[in-house]
Image (cartoon, rainbow, N blue to C red):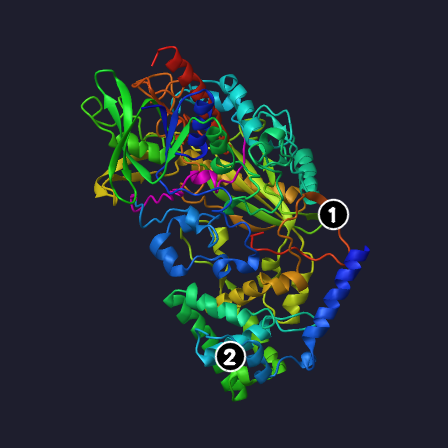
Amino acid sequence: MFDAIVIGSGMSGAIAAKELCERGLKTLVIERGRKIEHGVSYTDSLQPWELPNAGMVPEEEVARDYPVQSHCYAMTSANKAFWVKDSDHPYSTPADKPFDWIRGNHLGGRSLMWGRQSYRLSPMDFEANAKDGHGSDWPIRYDDLAPWYDHIERFIGVAGSKEGLAQLPDGEFLPPFALNDAEVLFKQAVESKFPGRNVIPGRVANLSKAQPHHEELGRVSCQVRSLCERGCSYGAYHSSLSSSLPAATRTGNLTIVTDAIVHSIVHDPKTGKVTGVRVIDANTKQGQLYEAKIIFSCASTIGTTQILLGSTSEAFPNGLANRSDMVGRNLMDHLYGLTVAGVLPKGPNTFYKGRRPTGLYIPRFRNVSEPGSFLRGYGYQGAASRMGWRSAALGKPGLGTDIKDRTRKLGPWMLYISGFGEMLPNPENRVTLHPTRTDKWGIPIVHIECAFGSNEQAMTKQIIADGKAMVEAAGGMVVNTSATPGTPGLGIHEMGTACMGKDPAKSVLNGFNQAHDIPNLFITDGSAMASSGCQNPSLTYMALSARAAHHATEFLRGGKI
Amino acid sequence: MNDLMALDRRSLIQQMLALAGAGAAVGFSPAALAKAAARAKPYLSPTHYALVTAVADTIIPRTDTPGAVDAGVPATFDALIANWASPDRRHQLSHALGEIDALAREKKGMGFAQLSATERLALLTPYDAEALQVVPSPAGGRGLSMMRGPTFANPGYGKLKELIVILYYISETALTHELTYDHTPGEWLPSVPVTPDTRPSGGAGLF
């Protein structure tokens, strides 16, 4: 019997485990994927010429095993082991509503390959649902989470600049990765021509300057290689393997099982509490039951949903903690891949050194300092860089000395900005269990039905229009526009399917990420999100996880659960 | 320029001279090309391997710096065909190579690999310009349109050239002699002056 079980070892689960362990709880982390190890499982030492097949996954293998995962920008032949084989982990969607579910089943989950952009939600994000009536009103406000953002930022290490913006609160930052000269030019143009808009250094969970508490865990400063998604042997970006699991391990309170696929969570109708987790060994298919006093589900948004919907009983015929019928509903991602790129013919005659692990960020301004013809808003990530060898060599016809000469020259500055738009919670965007299909472990597969609505469509147009205007304001010639959002899911910010809320009839979790229906069940992955904001969400998942672990421990110690 | 950089430039020049050898000014002869590109056990047939070698040497020849053959591109291309390409892709690339060879036989009466470097360049340059005309991309498709790249009038040739160029520019040879690559820069300097010696940085990333 453990004090706590945490399902999932990714971004949320490993932080929950660390916080529970640090509070003295004997904690078991259950991971469905295989064990991998910090350092030895990484491929960051490979030189460009050592990449298998020049970095490309074999075409037949893509078609057979990775038809969805291969849509992720970060997947290469060097790190394909960090992505699930779609062939082994099927799910279904309606034919006309594709959804790209990007996953990594291994110890540490997607914290190994995440984009590391780390932004706080703001007071207006926590008030949005109450204000416009979409989704369930968050049971917490920004001030409830602010100290936990501080706590997480200090622990993981976030490089960023303090800007004093209401819509993007500052945090406990390490020094920022400064804007390069073309980005400074862009910043000046945007901020002077569009008062209220800001161009700031991207806030990123890479150690621009490792602090003693990072070094204690074996982490050192970022070497500016931009090889992050292969795993970083320096531990310079936060992941479960570099950071949160080592912190949990040193307490002596952590146990980890891998290759353990959760079948269901066991509920005792007499006490009204959950008592344990049934797992299936991924290799032997043997069943096993683990028991604990409290359970945290951090299996990822869709993973947690699958577990809850599959954990049925007389007390919960529609799935665990689902008396509200909201489990699986309100699936959100961000509008993603809406990009405007332009050349800056009059860019500064300077260069930069290093491959920075971030770029620039433009915080939300629509429905903040400028009106929008839609609800909510969007921010942009982007960067300016000297056009690289690919475009120089392949951008136009030419052979021989022509190619060599032009590729040897420093290219012009290319600026791109890519919008991330808030998607409204919509109960019809929904994860359910497939009525007949099961995976090879006998677990019903999920059926995902998700599409952008009219608000997202209106937002999409404005993202592109504003993007063009800003690139042009800096003297940019727009050369490429991607005006259609990536398939839902491809933002890899799926969330919302076990939403927090004040009303137990309309939400799954209360203000402590505690299930309304079950006092000792906590859910702190993306499924808890009542709205999505437009900010990259992992920082919020981690802050919610730490906060919930704190309260869960207090409840346990106080005899309340 | 500091002393270290001067030393580096000198050593580069020496390496180039050593590489260039006799006859570099007029490029590889067909026999020298075959010898330079030799691979123990090619996947491709000898005819196709010779053709790939000649095409790679025409796209990126040895000049005052090493070319595609010096960088081992025929062998790495052969490995891609064996280990990466699908049957459809193999067919597409083989067809693209065949078209170039057919053009040589039509215009010059002999295979492309049998031509001199000058003849190869003269033949392939207009072909390249026409084949790489950008045509409208088909609508639809999943994923991100920007990652899919442009659509060329002759997509088979476009892919062939792209692979050869990528294999060259991610080679250790090109990252030493053409571009720069530092696996572990160690620091971010957001503003560095450009000098006549500044070269673009390479690597496998998208940007």
The front one of A263 and A450 is A263
The front one of A260 and A449 is A260
Q: Mark 2 — residue?
A: B50
Residue A288 at x, y percent in the picture: 26, 34
- Amino acid carrying label 2: it is Ala
- Amino acid carrying label 1: it is Val
> Which corner quadrant of the image does residue B95 belong to?
bottom left
> Label 2's element?
helix
Q: Which mark is residue B192?
A: 1
B154 displayed left or right of B8: left
Residue A9 appears in the picture as rendered = yes
Pointer 2 local density, CA inside 10 Å: few below 14, some 14–19, many at least 20: many
Q: Is residue A110 magenta?
A: yes
> Which corner quadrant of the image does residue A430 belong to?
top left
Residue A321 appears in the picture as rendered = no
Residue span colored magenta: A91-119
Locate the C terminus of chain A by quadrant: top left
> Label 1's element?
strand
| Dominant secondary structure of the residues highlighted in magenta in the image | loop
Residue A461 at x, y percent in the picture: 49, 40
Q: Is residue B104 above or below residue A153?
A: below
The front one of B97 and B15 is B15
Q: Is residue A142 magenta?
A: no
Which residue is outermost to the left?
A314
Which residue is outermost to the front?
A252
Q: Is residue A411 above or below residue A165?
A: below
A528 displayed left or right of A224: left
Return the chain for callout 2: B
Number of labels in the image equals 2
Residue A358 at x, y percent in the picture: 59, 41
Residue B87 at x, y percent in the picture: 37, 67
